[in-house]
Amino acid sequence: MKIRTDVAEMLRAGHSDTEVARGLHVDRKAVAKARAALSIPKHPRGPEPAATVEDLFQQRVAPTEGGHMEWTGYVAHTTPALRHQGRLTSAYRVAFRIANGREPEGYALPSCGRDGCVMPGHHADRADRKRAEAKAAVTRAWVRGRKRAARALERERAKAEAAREQRLDALYADIFGDSA
Ligand SMILES: [Zn+2]
């Protein structure tokens, strides 16, 4: 049997037959058949499963110009935060997890230059900050190295200039003697 993609998606997301039928304006019996064909167990009765922290995050962000996102939810001191299962979590941490698929090392903080940005992918953790610092150190060393190279070139140039002067002196001495 042919199963509509949107029906399959809603069933896999854990919605009941009634919800799918209502949401997509399809026959409830057809939804039940699709469920059987896909071997998805019936939606359990009882309370809705609790929203994940990522769901809560999605409900509290608004895109801004420049590809950033601002937080419309609770702010703890200056940090966008959300409460999930009784625990307060930084929205930066959730954004970091969404972008990187892992927990940050230490604190996740915006690294895009926009204060309070919660756009996933715009945060650095301690490991990222260490890497950025190491990179900056390499750049500084390189610039210092270039300065040294420039000074060496300058010394070379001065030496060449002095040698030329000496050659001229010798030449003039040959021609004019010491009186020139
Ligand atoms: Zn940003």
Image (tube, helix red, strand yellow):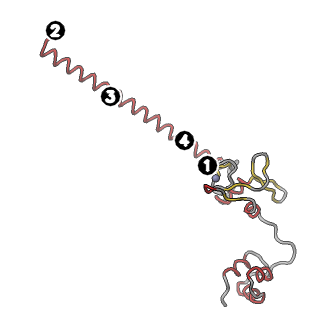
Which mark is in front, 2 or 4?
2
- Quarter of the rendering occupied by the C terminus: top left
Q: Are marks 4 and 1 in contact (CB under 8 Å)?
A: no
- Structural crowding at the residue carrying mark 1, measured as other residues with C-alpha within 10 Å and reported as few (<14), some (14–19) or many (≥20): some
What separation in Å lies between label 1 and label 3 (alpha carbons)? Answer: 42 Å
- Structural crowding at the residue carrying mark 2, measured as other residues with C-alpha within 10 Å and reported as few (<14), some (14–19) or many (≥20): few
Q: Of 57 and 146, which appears nearest the observer?
A: 57
Q: Earlier in the sequence, mark 4 or mark 1?
A: 1
The residue under label 3 is 156
Q: Is 150 left or right of 163, judged from the image as shown?
A: right
Q: Amino acid at mark 2?
A: Ser
The residue under label 2 is 179
Q: Of 34 and 25, which appears nearest the observer?
A: 25
Q: Are marks 1 and 3 in contact (CB under 8 Å)?
A: no
Q: Is residue 77 above or below residue 31?
A: above
In the structure shown, which secondary structural element does the residue marked by tag 3 occupy? helix
Q: Amino acid at mark 4?
A: Ala
Residue 67 is situated, as x and y percent measured from the top left of the image, at 62, 57
Q: Is mark 3 within 8 Å of ligand 1?
A: no
The numbered mark at residue 128 is 1
The residue under label 4 is 136
What separation in Å lies between label 4 and label 1 (alpha carbons)? Answer: 12 Å
What separation in Å lies between label 2 and label 3 (alpha carbons)? Answer: 31 Å
Which residue is painted at 16% across and 17% down in the image?
172
Q: Is 86 left or right of 167, judged from the image as shown?
A: right
Which residue is painted at 49% across and 37% down in the image?
141
